[in-house]
């Protein structure tokens, strides 16, 4: 019995410790509620399941302890699959993936609205940094190394 309790304590401690080593990603719905309580800068990460560079950033930049700490302490971090078919309510509006009805890999409205570029197609990954007033400070449409990500979030 003592061994079982010891194992449970070790497992719980490991679980709590592991959580601190990950970015606390939130959804747009949670962001909407959270911004009403307290404002702070926002980092938005749009990715797709098929994007090789997105997967590489997930394995490298977003696993770096310095980046994890900075994002968790100084930002609201939003991560969204740009091809999601989920309905998203944000700032009193409903956003959907209308392209999913006609395209295999349709891009969600909220991703098109925020990550879109004038006269250029949207490419992934997209990293956006917004200030406390939700104004875009930085928008990147390319793979970012760990060092580039550190520079971007310090900026």
Image (cartoon, rainbow, N blue to C red):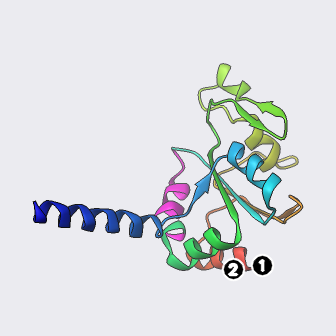
Residue at image location 72% in from the left, 79% down from the top: 154
Place of residue 136 in the rendered image (x, y in percent of width and height, measured from the top left):
85, 61
Residue at image location 70% in from the left, 42% down from the top: 29
Q: Is mark 2 on a helix, strand or loop?
A: helix
Question: Is residue 88 at all visible to an observer of this figure?
Answer: yes
Q: In the rendered view, does 15 fall on the left or right side of 85?
A: left
Quadrant housing residue 54: bottom right
Place of residue 121 in the rendered image (x, y in percent of width and height, measured from the top left):
76, 45
Q: Pointer 2: what residue?
A: 151
The residue closer to the viewer here, 119 or 151, is 151
Range of residues picked out in magenta:
50-61
Question: Is residue 102 at all visible to an observer of this figure?
Answer: no
Q: In the rendered view, does 70 fall on the left or right side of 16?
A: right
Q: Pointer 1: what residue?
A: 155
Q: In the rendered view, does 109 fall on the left or right side of 66?
A: right
Residue at image location 77% in from the left, 47% down from the top: 32
What is the residue that sits farthest to the top in this orientation?
101
């Amino acid at each position: 019995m003592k061994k079982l309790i010891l194992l449970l304590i070790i497992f719980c401690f490991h679980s709590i410790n592991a959580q601190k080593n990950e970015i606390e990603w939130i959804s747009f719905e949670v962001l909407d509620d959270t911004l009403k309580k307290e404002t702070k800068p926002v980092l938005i990460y749009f990715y797709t399941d098929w994007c090789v560079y997105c997967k590489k950033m997930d394995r490298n930049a977003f696993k770096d302890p310095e980046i994890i700490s900075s994002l968790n302490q100084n930002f609201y971090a939003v991560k969204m699959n740009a091809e999601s078919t989920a309905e998203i309510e944000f700032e009193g509006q409903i956003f959907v993936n209308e392209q999913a009805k006609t395209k295999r890999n349709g891009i969600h409205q909220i991703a098109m609205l925020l990550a879109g570029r004038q006269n250029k197609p949207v490419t992934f990954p997209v990293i956006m940094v917004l200030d406390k007033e939700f104004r875009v400070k930085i928008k990147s449409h390319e793979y970012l190394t760990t060092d580039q990500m550190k520079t971007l979030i310090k900026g």
